[in-house]
Image (tube, coloured by chain):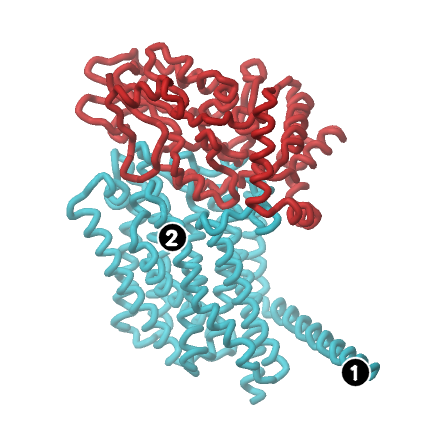
Amino acid sequence: METTQNHIRTHLTSIIGEVIAFGKDVITWSLSGGLAYQIYLCILAALMVLGVYAYFVQISLGLAATNMSDIVSWGFYIANFTFLVGVAAAAVMIILPSYIFKDKDLHKVVIIGECVAIGALLMCLMFVFVDMGAPWNAWHLIPGIGLFNWPTSLLTWDVLVLNGYLVLNLLVPAYILYCHYYHRKPNEKLYLPLVFISIFWAFGIHLVTAFLYQGLPARPFWNNPLMGPRFLASAFAAGPALIIIVLVIIQTTTSFRVEDAVFNKIRRISVVSAIINLIMLFSEVFKEFYLPTHHSLPAIYLYFGLKGNTALVPWIWTAITMNLIGTLILAFNPGKNNPRVMVAACALLFLGIWLEKGMGLIVPGLVPSPLGEVVNYAPSWVEVCITLGVLSLGIFVVSLLLKPALIIEQRYEAGE
Amino acid sequence: MDPRKNKIDQNSEEKDCRQSQGCDRRAFLKGAARVAAFGGAAMLAGCGGGMLGSKEELSLRWKEYFKKNYRLMTQEEKDETVRRLERLAKISNNVNVQISSAAPIEGVLYGYAFSVTRCKGYMECVAACVKENNLDRKSSMQYIRIFEMEHGQMSPEVGNAKFYHPVPVDDHFYMGVQCNHCQNAPCVKACPVKATWQEPDGIVVVDYDWCIGCRYCIAACPYYGRRFNWNEPVVPRDEMTKKQHYLGNRLRHRGKTEKCTFCIQRTRAGRLPACAEACPTGARVFGNLLDPDSEIRFVLKNKKVFRWKEDLGTDPKFWYFMD
């Protein structure tokens, strides 16, 4: 009896020791780097400080510090939130082929997709938080402690799926990296079920976020059954485009090598989704403009302006142009996977979707108001600074996660 | 207070507790909630209340911060929070207010009818509403909008709510818009924390202290019936309406949503809403839909009535009628 207890105790202490050693190395690796890396982290930290300052201004003045109003009641924060949910969900396009179809090329970069998803999810949750009028009452949203209007309110679904997806995306890579750190083979029976769940979950987070808008008959621009599928298509175009950009950055700044086949596969995923996205966009535009009704007023406001209010017109046409050019370059691949051409095309596609699915989606949902009033909206400096702060935090976290992850993966490969 | 009402109230209390199966579990989780929300409380004490006040004020604010959603409170807890709020109004604003927690009256379902022929656009209703409901003067918040409309159309979307000239204008008519108190309210469905709901007498209310300010209800409302406190609301002390209701015209804070409550503080005491009382033309009719002899029932039976955006299936309790 006593010997088994002793045995368990020594076993436990050894596990704790292992975890501590792992944690120590992860922290050291994530913070150590060349001068350029340190400066990069400092710039991000400075932007985060700026964001914190702007948030204090917002807390003391109330959301009056933003340019939102009773008509445009959601603005830049929710626009960024919506777009980033897509970026988070898009990791599934790497996870699915690498874990389920056992694609060896993509398997080497799956960890990068997962780290980007974690960063995107953090940003999503932060954007919802900074948008809250009474963040000090956020505990009312905690199931069991507060009062959770589930399953009626779509917003509660979003809280559940986003946090759940964050946990899934933290658990799987943490376990795999931990095993690789000690040169062990991770136990598939332990993590594959979680991977399966996370694949369905990824579709879930994006559909739920689309339903948040789609389920509102009060807003004809959103009350559109194509919203969910379009969210997925645009996400699976923008997300992989971002991952290509991250891969090129890693390729040029670290010793981690990414094969051409990887770029080619991700490029194809992105381009197919981008084309489907454009087809659905065309379908929407046709419906709004072939026989315009009262319900087409938001679309008219978005594309051509209404009653002299044209704030969104340059945004949307820039977005569509970038979208088209990016998709064409990625489809015809004139640079033959030349990283520079790829990065430019991916950046165009990514920014185009950001413009269209961010501000281009949220503001026309709210303008004209239900009483037909038309106003313009552009974010205030407080909104811009807080947004910069949140984005920097996301990039910062992704960087700190990727750095040790890549070192562990490289060591594991070399050790084999 | 009418003892009969008290009894009804307690019954509904018990029912509420059973429905949520929450009484015991809630008590158990209270401790956990306190720990979890400590940071938030500190934030509120620091920012929400402005400067740090006296020890008494701090203790009151602390208790206010951790109180439940109004619907889950027992009558005792309702009385306590009302006392705290009255005391806080005295301490921080030096004003004596009376806050009621009067329950809905049994056998009452409120409805409203607005005459597009009688209204002349005088806006007395708007002024009365602002005064009665302690609406924020800083942002000029208004629950009611009056649209000036040309003949030949019947939707405020094509009307003009920004008219600054003598009324009435020839060949125009006027249409008032406010919360429709939908029987099937999209805002209630949207709220993630059950901070807004429909009372048994049909009034859609907000628990201002439970609202987290996500504004999903505003996005969900097809009638532009909801307002948000973008800044800390300002109501001059000498203009303040001091007879208040917890779910009605008590003072709100920034970051919270609010709306028309059919003047719950008046109507549950048997009076008309301020807008209906103020209207000089008799364009506004308010009453009990369940009472066959009420004026509202007369209008619904004898006038040509219609409801706005009927196609959305919201089932409003706000009708428009023509004479």
Q: Residue at x 64, y 38 (%)?
A: B67
How packed mark 1 is, by other alpha carbons closer than 10 Å (few <14, some 14-19, many 20 or more), is few
Screen quadrant of the C terminus of chain B: top left
Residue B14: numbered disc: none
Front residue of this view, candidates A38 and A120: A120
Q: Earlier in the sequence, mark 2 or mark 1?
A: 1
Is residue A366 at least partly visible in the picture? yes
The reply to whether residue A58 is in sight is no
The mark found on residue A4 in the picture is 1
Q: Chain of mark 2?
A: A
Percent coordinates x, y for residue A61 in the rendering: 55, 34
Between disc 2 and disc 1, the foreground one is: 1
Quadrant of residue B9 within the rendered picture: top right
Chain letter for the part of the structure drawn in cyan: A
Residue B96, quarter of picture: top right
Q: Residue at x 20, y 41 (%)?
A: A293
- Residue A27 at x, y percent in the picture: 65, 68
Is B80 left, or right, of A87 in this rendering?
right
B95 relative to A162, above or below: above
Disc assigned to residue A211? 2
At a point 71% along the width and 48% down the height, the residue shown is: B31
Q: Is residue A384 left or right of residue A349?
A: right
Return the residue nearer the eye: A5 or A207.
A5
Q: Position of residue B26 (x, y in %)?
A: 65, 46
Dot 2 alpha-carbon crowd within 10 angstroms: few under 14, some 14 to 19, many 20 or more = many
**Chain B shown in which color?**
red
